[in-house]
Image (cartoon, grey):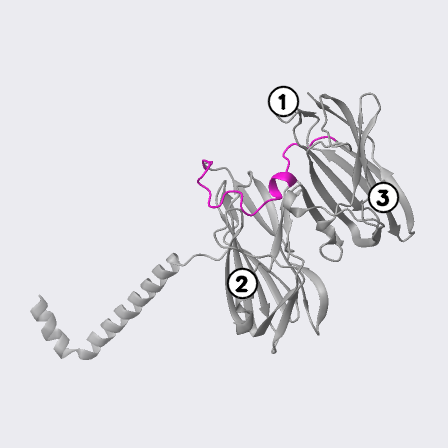
Amino acid sequence: MFGRFGVWARANPLKVFSVVLVLAVVSGVAVYAYLGLLTPQAGPRVTIISPPLEFSLELDKAEYQYGENITIVLCLRNMSNQTITMDKRSRWPYWRGHPVGPVVFTEFYGVSPEDENKARGLIHFGFSITHQNGTVIFRQYEGPLAATYDIDIYAGGYIKQAWIWDLPLPKATYQIRGILSCAVPGTFWHSTLETPSITFIVNNGRERRYGEFHNPGAIVYAYLQSFKPQAGPRVTITSPPLEFSLELDKTEYPFSEERRSGENITITFCLKNISNQTITVHKNTMLPIDSSLNCLTTEADRANADYPLLSALFHFGFSITDENGTEIFKEFRGPLQAIYSFTIEPNGYVKQTLIWNSPTGVGSTLPRGVYQIRGIFHGAVVPGFKLSTLETPSITFTIK
């Protein structure tokens, strides 16, 4: 058979060439299609453009099983034809392998050689994640260190960072937005860019056992405090343009014989602008909180202040009264006589969650009993500039 084919091939060289060419084309197409199947499909991507910057957010996909890692890619690109400077006013150091740090991978192109270590060693971007019920369960985009830095990015250059979110989210639908806070000297002052939202879904899946997670609990130090599947008691006072609320995580706390006090109490304060115009809130004292204590988390939406005022200061206060009517704790003014302010846009808010370990004003702790707590906000608001003190109704709680 092959002998006769050889005779035919020698007699018909053009036909043989045509057959070989067709086979080569078909094989090439098949290989390309096969390789295409192996190429990872790009996930959803959104972009915001504010010349000379293009800032984008991308997920690896839009649907996840419970406990599955989520890859979040944030990219800043210089879309102009000249070198720009990204000016940041806080530093978020990244230590690879740190047991309580996020897992972040950095890629860059067209960065000044003098700035490559900064591009590689710092986290430059942030993001927010919102639960389907409207609860913001994570929002972080500023670093913990109040120290400025800048990075020169050449025309067409970019900095890209991929976060590996490894803390399992409950089954639900979520929205995520990328956040960039920076200035570009000569173009615009310090501002915050937020991408449009990407919706993603977490489905049921096999729950991983403890220890199976890569860096368990690494990224979201505010997550467990901010997301409460079952909210505790909440009270509100409204005094336009402000709505001020107080919330506890629950109403009963067990007493610890070892600590001789009740367990920690989670207290959430929220100041919201319910008007249709931007307001400025002025405070005439400062109450700094030591960040190393990990007792205060701050969440803000459409609220702005000079960094690090929003997160480094406690803006609210509260009072505790026992069942006899004796006021055993009251604090709403800071020890520092210094004025500061922050703005809140319409429907924006500042929310702070305090982990309180039950100290009273005399250094003791709360014994068993029934107590009442009220939230207190003291400040002035523009327009109007009227100094006032707002106090919420009381919430009753028990240490058993």
Q: Which residue is mark 1?
A: 257
Circle 3: residue type = His
Q: Which residue is mark 2?
A: 160
| Tag 3 near tag 1, CB within 8 Å | no
In the displayed structure, does residue 116 sit left or right of residue 282?
Answer: left
* Image quadrant occupied by the N terminus: bottom left
Sequence-wise, the earlier of marks 2 and 3 is 2
Residue nearest the observer in this picture, 294 or 173: 294
Q: Position of residue 91 (x, y in %)?
A: 62, 59
Distance, label 1 to label 2, CA atoms, is 51 Å
Residue found 80% across the figure and 21% down from its top: 323
- Residue numbers of the magenta segment: 207-233
Q: Position of residue 327 (x, y in %)?
A: 83, 28
Residue nearest the observer in this picture, 127 or 341: 341
Mark 2, other Cα within 10 Å: few <14 / some 14–19 / many ≥20: many
Q: Position of residue 35 (x, y in %)?
A: 36, 61
How would you classify the magenta stretch by its main secondary structure? loop
Q: Is the residue 273 above or below the residue 106 in the image?
A: above
Residue found 65% across the figure and 71% down from its top: 52
Q: Which residue is mark 3?
A: 378
Mark 1, other Cα within 10 Å: few <14 / some 14–19 / many ≥20: few
Distance, label 3 to label 1, CA atoms, is 36 Å
Circle 1: residue type = Glu
Distance, label 2 to label 3, CA atoms, is 42 Å
